[in-house]
Image: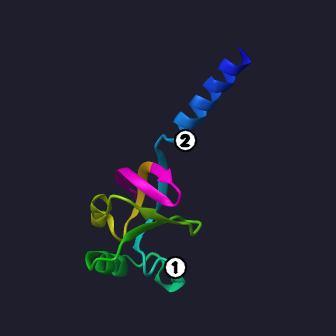
Amino acid sequence: MKTLTAAALLALGLAAAGMAADFTGFVEDTACSTMPGMKNDAACAQKCIKGGDAAVLVTPDGKIYKLADQAKITAHAGHNVTITGELKGDTITIASVKMNKM
């Protein structure tokens, strides 16, 4: 019986790890995301992402997440958003994107 309980708890834990979560932050280009002087520069983010730089999500505490599904995020360049998606390593696979009010 203990083995069955342990297996069930393990399965539930693995299922929860694969579930979507919300990530909030600013959509910025990869090149400028590490430059403090470019923080929240919407015009730069829009220009660089339109020019082909990959978009990333920069959280309020400075964590930078890579974003799979670039086609789903490019329209949100330079915006504060909440992304619902699945995190694997440091990359979020996007399920949906919602604009945040400033």
Q: Does residue 57 sit above or below 7 in this rendering? A: below
Q: Nearer the viewer, residue 25 or 1?
A: 1
The residue beneath circle 2 is 17
Residues rendered magenta in the picture:
86-101
Give the class, few, some or many, for how many residues have Cα within 10 Å of label 2's Cα (few <14, many ≥20): few
Res 99 quadrant in image: bottom left
Q: Which secondary structure dominates the residues rendered in magenta?
A: strand
Q: Does residue 80 sit above or below 6 in this rendering? A: below
Residue 64, disc? none
Residue 46 is situated, as x and y percent measured from the top left of the image, at 31, 76
Residue 10 is situated, as x and y percent measured from the top left of the image, at 62, 31
Q: Nearer the viewer, residue 26 or 88?
A: 88
Instruction: Identify the element where label 2 is drawn.
Output: helix
Residue at the far front in the pictured view = 3
Res 92 quadrant in image: bottom left
Give the class, few, some or many, for how many residues have Cα within 10 Å of label 1's Cα (few <14, many ≥20): some
Residue 47 is situated, as x and y percent measured from the top left of the image, at 29, 80
Q: Residue at x 42, y 49 (%)?
A: 84
Residue at the far top in the pictured view = 1
Residue 34, disc? 1
Q: Residue at x 32, y 63 (%)?
A: 70
Q: CA distance from mark 1 to mark 2?
A: 28 Å
Left or right placement of residue 84 versus residue 5 in this view:
left
- Does 7 appear in magenta? no
Which quadrant, please, contains the N terminus?
top right
Left or right placement of residue 72 versus residue 40 in this view:
left
In the rendered structure, which disc, 1 or 2, sits on the residue that comes first in sequence?
2
